[in-house]
Image (tube, grey):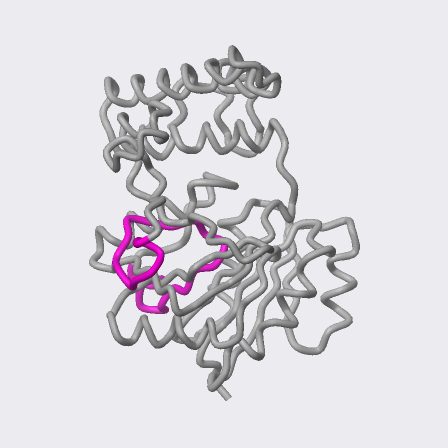
C-alpha cells in the first residue's frame, strides 16, 4: 500500500531522543498511512541499534554528509505525495501530521510547518523573515520587523498564514514541491539549508504556510551545540546572503556578522571569540563547509 505521507528523520548520535519521536508518529498520523525512513549520518552512540530493533521504520545508513544530504536520501526513498521532515529531538502531538496535510491540501502550499513548543509547553518562535542587511545588525530587541529576522508577535502564532521561511525542525513538503524545486543544497552541510529551500520554493510558486493546529514539542540540541556549530551557522548565513546579492551588500553583511559577534565578546561572552576566529580565518573554518579558500563565504 502506498503511503500517504513519508516521515524522514536524519539522525546523528540521537539515541537519547529519536525513540520518543518514532513512538509519537502513529497518533500524529491519525487517518493517514505513514512510512518512516531514518537516515543515520554515522552515529556512534547506539542510535543505529535502537532503530534496528524497531519494526516500524526503515533505516538508511549513510556517511555524515550533512543534514541536507540526509533529507535528499529520505526524499529519494519514497514516492509518497508528502514528506514530513522531522528532527530526531521532536515529539509530534496527536493529529499534527494530519493537520499539516490538511493545511497543504486546503492552501495548495508546497511547505507547511507546525507550531513548535518547548518541553514545558511554551511557544517556540520558529517563524522567520528573509535575511537582510538591516536584520543582521543585532537590533532584533527593538521589535521592529525591518530589524528582526525572527517573527515574535504572539498573534503570528495563533493563525494560519504564509511566512518567508521557518526553522526546519518539522516541515511538511509536497512531492510536487520537491520535484520542482530540486534537491536540498548539500553545500550548507548544517544550518541555512531550510532557508535556501523555502526561498527557492517560493521563487517557483510554492508558499511556506504556518499551521497552528499542528503542534510538536521540540527539545532542541539533540545533536549538541558547540563553538564550531555556532560558527557554521553564522558562516552559512553569510553564504546564503552572498549567493543572492552583489559584492558590496555581501561584504557589508559579512562585516555586520563580524561586528555582531565581536560585540557579544566585548559584553563578556567568552565563547564569541573562538567563533569569531573561525569566521575571520578561513583556515580555521569547519572543513565540511568547503570555505577555507575564501574570506567571504559563498
Q: Residue at x 78, y 63 (%)?
A: 49
Is 178 a magenta residue? yes
Q: Nearer the viewer, residue 283 or 16?
A: 16
Please determine whether, in this image, residue 241 is positioned above or below residue 265. Answer: below
Res 80 → quadrant: bottom left
**Taking 176 as reference, is 283 left or right?**
right
Residue 103: x percent and y percent?
32, 72
Of residues 197 and 274, the one drawn nearer to the viewer in this rendering: 274
Q: Position of residue 13 (x, y in %)?
A: 71, 50
Relative horizontal placement of residue 125, taking residue 266 as reference (left or right): left
Give the farthest residue toward the bottom: 1
Q: In the image, is residue 283 above or below residue 70?
A: above
User: Considering only vertical position in the picture, is 1 above or below 14?
Assistant: below
* Residue most extreme to the top: 266
Q: Residue at 25% across / 70% down in the picture?
A: 108
Residue 167 horizontal/vertical position (percent)? 43, 49
Of residues 18 and 151, the one nearer the viewer is: 151
Residue lying at 41% horizontally and 15% vertically, measured from the top left: 259
Residue 33 part of the magenta segment:
no
Residue range (magenta): 155-180
Q: Is 136 positioned to the left or the right of 263 in the image?
A: left
Amino acid at each position: 500500500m502506498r503511503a500517504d505521507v513519508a516521515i524522514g528523520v536524519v539522525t546523528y548520535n540521537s539515541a537519547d531522543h529519536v525513540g520518543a519521536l518514532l513512538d509519537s508518529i502513529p497518533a500524529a498520523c491519525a487517518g493517514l498511512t505513514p512510512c518512516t525512513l531514518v537516515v543515520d549520518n554515522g552515529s556512534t552512540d547506539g542510535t543505529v541499534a535502537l532503530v534496528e530493533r524497531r519494526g516500524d521504520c526503515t533505516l538508511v545508513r549513510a556517511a555524515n554528509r550533512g543534514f541536507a544530504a540526509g533529507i535528499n536520501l529520505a526524499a529519494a526513498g519514497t514516492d509518497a505525495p508528502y514528506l514530513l521532515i522531522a528532527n530526531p529531538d521532536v515529539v509530534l502531538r496527536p493529529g499534527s501530521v494530519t493537520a499539516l496535510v490538511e493545511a497543504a491540501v486546503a492552501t495548495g502550499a508546497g511547505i507547511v510547518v507546525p507550531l513548535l513548543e518547548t518541553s514545558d509547553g511554551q511557544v517556540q518562535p520558529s517563524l522567520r523573515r528573509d535575511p537582510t542587511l538591516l536584520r543582521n545588525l543585532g537590533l532584533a530587541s527593538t521589535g521592529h520587523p525591518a530589524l528582526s529576522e525572527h517573527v515574535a508577535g504572539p498573534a503570528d502564532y495563533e493563525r494560519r498564514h504564509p511566512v518567508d521561511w521557518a526553522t526546519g525542525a518539522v516541515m511538511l513538503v509536497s512531492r510536487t514541491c520537491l520535484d520542482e524545486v530540486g534537491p536540498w543544497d548539500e553545500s550548507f552541510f548544517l544550518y541555512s539549508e531550510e532557508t535556501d529551500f523555502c526561498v527557492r520554493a517560493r521563487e517557483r510558486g510554492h508558499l511556506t504556510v504556518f499551521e497552528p493546529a499542528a503542534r510538536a514539542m521540540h527539545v532542541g540540541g539533540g545533536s549538541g551545540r558547540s563553538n564550531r556549530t555556532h560558527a557554521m551557522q553564522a558562516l552559512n548565513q553569510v553564504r546564503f546572503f552572498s549567493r543572492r546579492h552583489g559584492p558590496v551588500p555581501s561584504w557589508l553583511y559579512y562585516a555586520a556578522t563580524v561586528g555582531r559577534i565581536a560585540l557579544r565578546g566585548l559584553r563578556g561572552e567568552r565563547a564569541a571569540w573562538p567563533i569569531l576566529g573561525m569566521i575571520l580565518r578561513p583556515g580555521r573554518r569547519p572543513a565540511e563547509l568547503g570555505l577555507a579558500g575564501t574570506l567571504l563565504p559563498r
